[in-house]
Amino acid sequence: MTSATNPLGLAFMKMHGLGNDFVVIDSRGRGAVTTPALARALGDRHRGVGFDQLAEIRDSAEADFALDFWNSDGSRAGACGNATRCVAEFVMRGSGKAAVTLTTTRGHLQAVRRADGLVSVNMGAPQLDWAEVPLARPADTLHLPISGDPVAVGMGNPHCVFFVGNAETVNVADLGALFETDPLFPQKTNVEFATLTGPDRLRMRVWERGAGITLACGSGACATAVAAHRRGLTGRKVTLDLDGGALEIDWRSDGVWMTGPTAHVFDAMLPPAFLASIG
Ligand SMILES: N[C@@H](CCC[C@H](N)C(=O)O)C(=O)O
């Protein structure tokens, strides 16, 4: 840890979207600093700072900024909807704009601040083909050959969505850990449990790949909305009630739009001694 640190350490921000919490490192104007070891050390809620995902902002030649995501176990995440909203709001506030573009491993995305202060992000088109999710072998993504008849959806990261009678009573810890490593998902998977609670309204609980149970998952909410529409349970525009609050999801012709709140909690420095201990 040398290139991005100054004698005071490494600056970071803590943000959350519906309680899905993030450490955000702004590396615009310099090289990226995150390594798997830094993500693991920072992600440790006892010895580090703790987060569900780490998001690193980088310069982008073709958009306002680029974003990389890491899970607390040090693995990479291809998408993180809640962090995308939070960082988009931070960049919009800093630039005085009400709309920005960004790039992730998914490509070019857009974000806008609505008049009510909520932030909308176009999370891109869902990946519905087995190879894109990805699955390990050809399978019908609408009816996976897994007990419980889940749906597979890719949103730049894999999701396995179960529709259940009552999401409140599901043992998310045990079942999430079990299905995260199902051999049908060669890159592992995020796991969602959803129940239809009203017209175009779903209750959803989530187990995130590489992080475990979280209070919300933006890409998981998008995947669940897509799965619900494909199963004929809802229209294309739905509200999802997560443990941390509600997200609006709208599957439009140009992609899946996700709308929700953002929170910038505090700014802080990682001391040099912490960085040195990582090696
Ligand atoms: N919290 C995120 C999704 C996080 C990514 C996931 N754990 C993965 O490895 O794919 C969100 O808000 O989308």
Image (cartoon, helix red, strand yellow):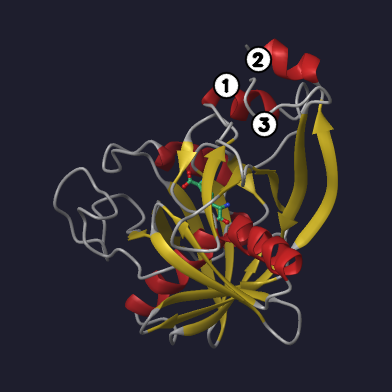
Q: In this figure, which residue is indicated by the disc labeled 2?
A: 278
Which residue occupies 41% across, 42% down?
179
Q: Amino acid at mark 1?
A: Ala
Does residue 122 appear in the picture of this structure? no
Of 58 and 253, the residue lying toward us:
58
Label pair 2/1, CB-CB below 8 angstroms: yes
Q: Amino acid at mark 2?
A: Ile
Quadrant of image for the C terminus: top right
Q: Residue furthest left?
A: 138
Which residue occupies 38% across, 36% down?
181
Q: Residues within 10 Å of mark 1 (few under 14, many from 20)?
A: some
Of 124 and 230, the residue lying toward us:
124
Image spot of residue 255 (x, y percent) = 40, 76
Q: In this figure, which residue is indicated by the disc labeled 1?
A: 37
Q: Going from the N terminus, do you reach mark 3 or mark 1 first?
A: 1
Instruction: Measure how far apart labels 3 and 1 are at the Cα level.
Output: 10 Å
Task: From this view, report whether residue 250 is shown above or below residue 207.
Answer: below
Q: In this figure, which residue is indicated by the disc labeled 3?
A: 43
At mark 1, the secondary structure is: helix
At mark 2, the secondary structure is: helix
Q: Going from the N terminus, do you reach mark 2 or mark 1 first?
A: 1
